[in-house]
Every structure is written in C-alpha cells, then in structure tokens.
Image: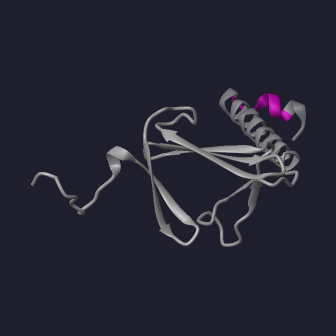
Amino acid sequence: MTPQQFAKLPRYAQNAFHQERRSKHDAEEKIRRLTDTQTKTKIWVEDYGAEIDHQREYVQGDAIVIAHAGVCLKVTAYRDQGIELSWSEGDCPYGTGDVAFIPTSYQQARLTAVENMHTNTRFEGDSE
C-alpha cells in the first residue's frame, strides 16, 4: 500500500494500523529484553504447567522472594557457602511474625502461617 492509498483510508483504519504496529513493536522489544536477560545464572524459575517442554527463566541476581498464603520466603545463593533461607509472616522477607516449619518428607518441608495451621493432635493440658 502506498502512502497515498493509506491516507485515503478512514481515520479508524489508520489508527488501528498504527496500534497494531505499536503492539508488534512492543512485543518484539519484550522478546528482545527477555532474551538479553536470559544469561545463565545459578537461580532460575521453571513453570511446569505452562508448556510440555518447560523452560527456565534465569534470575539476574542472587536472591528470589516468594510470598504466598501468608508466608514470605527469601532464598539467597549465599556466596560460595551454600543457600540461605529466611522466612517471615506476610509478604515481606523482613517481617517478624511467626511461621511454622513443618517437615513433610526427606529433605522437604512446608512453611505455613501460624494462623493457617490445622491439627487434630491434643496435648496434655489442652481444654476440650
């Protein structure tokens, strides 16, 4: 289409064309940025539910924070000495509320906000 033909299009068609062009440019820019930030690191995120062949998205840093169900967990690749875990109540890695650490299996545990804990175990001295 020539510039003269484009100029003869109704204004809404010209606007729609420009919007599509901007959307395409924005999508290309997002892909370019994602590709640029995917330098391999020791920390990544995997989404097993999104695709059959899940892909790693690398974190360009040395820590990630996960806030879910009233618990905030910070995982830090602590220099060359290992991995450091810190947790707190709420959605801030520096909170002071209590969180329950519940072993669930060999080398596996669950962090739970204290108010979300449910138990059927009665201890001596508990009231009915």
| Image coords of residue 111 (percent x, y) | 48, 53
Magenta run includes residue 6? yes
Q: Indicate whether 80 appears above or below 25.
A: below
Instruction: Identify the residue at the far left of this view.
Output: 128
- In the image, 17 versus 61, the foreground residue is 61
Q: Is residue 62 above or below residue 10?
A: below
Magenta span includes 86: no
Residue 67: horizontal and vertical position, in percent? Answer: 53, 43
- The answer to which quarter of the image holds residue 65 is top right
Q: Residue at x 57, y 32 (%)?
A: 94
* 65 on left or right of 69: right
What's the magenta region?
5-10
Q: Position of residue 4 (x, y in %)?
A: 87, 30
Q: Residue at x 12, y 51 (%)?
A: 127
Q: Is residue 55 left or right of residue 104?
A: right
Which image quadrant: the C terminus?
bottom left
At x 24% / y 63%, what residue is drawn? Answer: 121
Q: Nearer the viewer, residue 56 or 26?
A: 56
Q: Position of residue 93 (x, y in %)?
A: 58, 36
* Residue name at image x 33 percent, y 44 percent: 115
